[in-house]
Image (cartoon, rainbow, N blue to C red):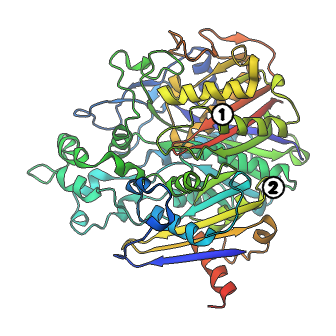
Amino acid sequence: MNRVIISSMGVVSPIGTGKEEFYAGMDSKTSGTGAISCFNTDFFPVSIGAEARKSGKVILSEKNNDRRMVFNEIAFQELFSYRGLDGYEFNERMLIAGCSLDHFRIEEYAQSSDAKTHDWQGYSDNSYAMFEHYARKFSITGGTIVNVSACVASSQAIGLGFRILSGGGKKAIIAGGVDSMLNPLHYMGFYKLGALSDWKGDPKKACRPFDRDRRGVVLGEGAAYYLLENAAYARGARPLAEITGYASTIDGYLITDPDPNGAHLAKAAMEAIEQSGISPDRIDCVHAHGTGTLKNDSAECSAMKLIFGNRYNRIPVFSLKAQVGHLIGACGAIELAAVIYSLEKQTVPATVNFETPDPAIDLKVLRNPLQKPINYILKLNAAFGGQNTALVLKKA
Amino acid sequence: MNIACNSYRSNEAIPVDPFLKNKKLKKYFNRETSAALATVGKLLGEATVDPSSTALYYATGILEYEDYGLDRIAANALDADAVFSPKRFIENGIAEVSPLNQFKVLLNMPLSFIAIEYGFKNDNAVIYSSAVGLLTSALCAPPCASILLGAGKTFADGAVEMCFALTSREEVRRIPLENPREEAYLTLKRIAFKDTGA
């Protein structure tokens, strides 16, 4: 198996855009959640979201437009500002990206004459075409793959990139994802599912992973992309991290709930750890999916017991979602930026809004950052519908 | 490679009941999920498949069809001057849509319901549109007994094309990819009709 390194990154998130801003947001335990400003929520039953920000301000886009386009533009620019693709032929450059749903311009459609004839397709911004556009624009012409596996879409995209490169050959793979559910139609879709946090207090506290008083998901938005390279061909690269293992499983349990036993999330983790050539006791911390829903956090705790045995409540666990919200199709990608932060800073971050432990979830969730030697991190994600992913990252 | 394909016309009912152990699941299905379950049922029939060692990859076509209730939402969201009203969108539009309809929107539902119905637990992915994504996922599959490879497309008029193949990495490697951007259901359909001589 060939070594696969991450040699560049571009990130747009609710706690900042660019690696430096993102790291500063991590250092300061910033929460990017708040009252939504990118569309009118005056009559919405809930109105909290985590909007992407740059230099402290919400990134603007034209009214009703697909905000993912803006995020992609910025994230790709940043990624290539650190390291270009000059060492690779055009057919050696691939884009593998995750996202969830096509953006839909409901306001424009509703007011159009097309609504009378059900001709809605022209108001739907096709995700595949969006990625093809950016692939062409940035000369990534060796193939485009778009994964739409809901909340594991971008972690599966990164995992597939890892598999291609670990199998050998010279390729540069840009892997990651983009998403924004912060538009009226998709936002209310998640509300109808009963998934959104109905927290009545300070909106910055609305997403509370692993906390006793957790109330559900806060939707976020942004993009994160990584340049993955086969270490043997990555001349001059300064690796940010190494990917050593990846696996994906499905619960096949209920469509609405994760398997409360976490059996197949744990199976994915064990496979990724085994592929890394290590045992679970070499994992230094876990970056969890940690949505802040009653059932996900509980299932993840069950999985931790299966993965780590008696050590499950001694290994530090972190969730980024209190800070950036749930990016759905891009959550794995954005959360990988926090994994790289942990590896570079040798720090397990504090989980923001973790205030009152849930007696049923006795994991080691931190209220303050912990400095410690970190060589390996396990990154977990899980999707509505039962898909699970596990990635193992190693300090470069 | 064992392969099964189904085509359904725009208003044709998709009989999925015979292929469901848990018929209550049907309330969540859109036309594509129904067609996927019916086609997997037809393919697997009495076949013995080890679900714990079968990888599952599915590609859904570019979105052209919806049965979420978009028109009702759009019509009810307009005020007396035919201007979009956030108040009416919430109180008259979205409010009338069943929460169950959200399951008709999420693109990973066909794969998730197949996993629930047949007990698949292994490696998986849902790819948007392209054959290259579907086949690359299968080629990179971890060691497993078999691969269930599927692709579907629901057209704007509600017609559905669906193909599933029970295959292996070695067989996937031999699939000719005539156009990397080709929608995956077309690739599987071409193989199916070539295999059967149709």
Give whichever of A86, A251 is nearer the camera: A251
Position of A123 compared to B92: left or right? right
Picture quadrant of residue A28: top right
Residue at position x 21%, y 66% in the image? A116
Marks 2 and 1, the one that precedes in the sequence: 2
Q: Is residue A233 left or right of residue B9?
A: right
Q: Are marks 2 and 1 on the same chain?
A: yes
> Residue B173: percent from the left, percent from the top?
79, 69
Point out the image quarter for the C terminus of chain A. top right
In this picture, is B35 found above or below A64? below
Residue A61 placement (x, y as % from top left): 40, 42
Q: On the image, which quarter does residue A17 sit in?
A: top right
Q: Which residue is mark 1?
A: A380
Q: Nearer the viewer, residue A83 or A176?
A: A176
For mark 2, give the secondary structure: loop
Percent position of residue B136, x then y: 72, 61
Q: Which residue is mark 2?
A: A88
Residue A240 in view = no
Q: Secondary structure at mark 1?
A: strand
